[in-house]
Amino acid sequence: MISLQAQLMRFFLRRFVAKNKQAESTPEASRRLVAHALGRMPVPAAAVISHIQVGNVAVEIVRPRVVMDTGRVMMYVHGGGYVTGSPQTHRAFTARLALELQCEVWVPDYRLAPEHPFPAGLEDVYAVWVEFVQQHKGKILILGGESAGGGLSLALCYLARRRRVSQPHGLYLQSPWLDLQMAGDSYRRNEGSDILTSTRTTELSFARHYAGSCPRTDPLLSPLYGDPTGLPSTYVQVSDTEIFEDDSRSFVAQALIAGVDVTLEVGHGLWHAWPLFAPFLPEATRSIRHFGDWVRKG
């Protein structure tokens, strides 16, 4: 049974999405919608924001105002279907991660499609990852992201392995979008229950813009088709009502067969990327704590 807050939020989110359905018709309109929906979430006062430049990529660094020496750092890749989103739209969430993990969190402002289709965004997060590794030698490195950011995080692991660059010590995939072919049954099974997105919108507004003419089975584009052997310990969160559910379940099954230490948390009756809605959603706050507990036990 989900909380009363979740029931109310589900009702209002469904109305908000229905009211703004036509607003997803262009990338610019989608960006305004995401900025309006997520960019106004409250940022904890205990977080401090700064910025650096890595080559051509701007990076936002979020850290606790008072930092404990935990020996860990994190790079977080924001979601948004490869077309929308920014460090600013996700600042409230990355600040909560920084406070939960008691560490600084790097958030790359990678290039977006359709202006910059695959592999532009991946090359940007790779460039930042190389610098991130270089600056934090000897630290515990955590990499993660939600939705398209989860897909980019897993693809980044495969690209780093190919180029012989250090892997993270822990990988966090929140409602990851891992298959741009959208072959899983949940793209049809959960089409009516996913209140934040739909299979049709995902294909028309996001997948085709990012993939362009590239084969959608390329593991760097759709990392579900990659080889998970040798991946670090991985924590996956997914809702049982979202269209991306089977991406996570298929990846977890493959990873377990490959010997990866993988943990799956299922949000029953929730929706895509529900942890972004902390602190208003008790389930979101709990899921952030669950991830934090997993990191601390690692």
Image: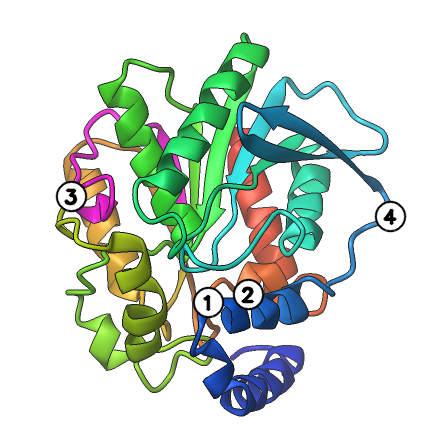
Three-letter amino acid code at the position of disc 2: Arg
Q: Where's residue 294, x and y in %? A: 51, 38
In this rendering, position of residue 226 left or right of residue 175: left
Three-letter amino acid code at the position of disc 3: Asp
Earlier-in-chain disc, 4 versus 2? 2
Three-letter amino acid code at the position of disc 4: Ala
Q: Which residues are magenta?
A: 219-237
Compared with 11, 248 (above or below) is above
Q: Label 2 neighbourhood size at 10 Å, few (<14), some (14-19), many (20+)? A: some
Which residue is label 2 attached to? 31
The reply to whether the C-beta atoms of the residues labelled 1 and 4 are less than 8 Å apart is no
The label shown at residue 45 is 4
Q: Secondary structure at mark 2?
A: helix
The label shown at residue 218 is 3
Earlier-in-chain disc, 3 versus 2? 2
Q: Secondary structure at mark 3?
A: loop
Earlier-in-chain disc, 1 versus 4? 1
Quarter of image, res 97: top right
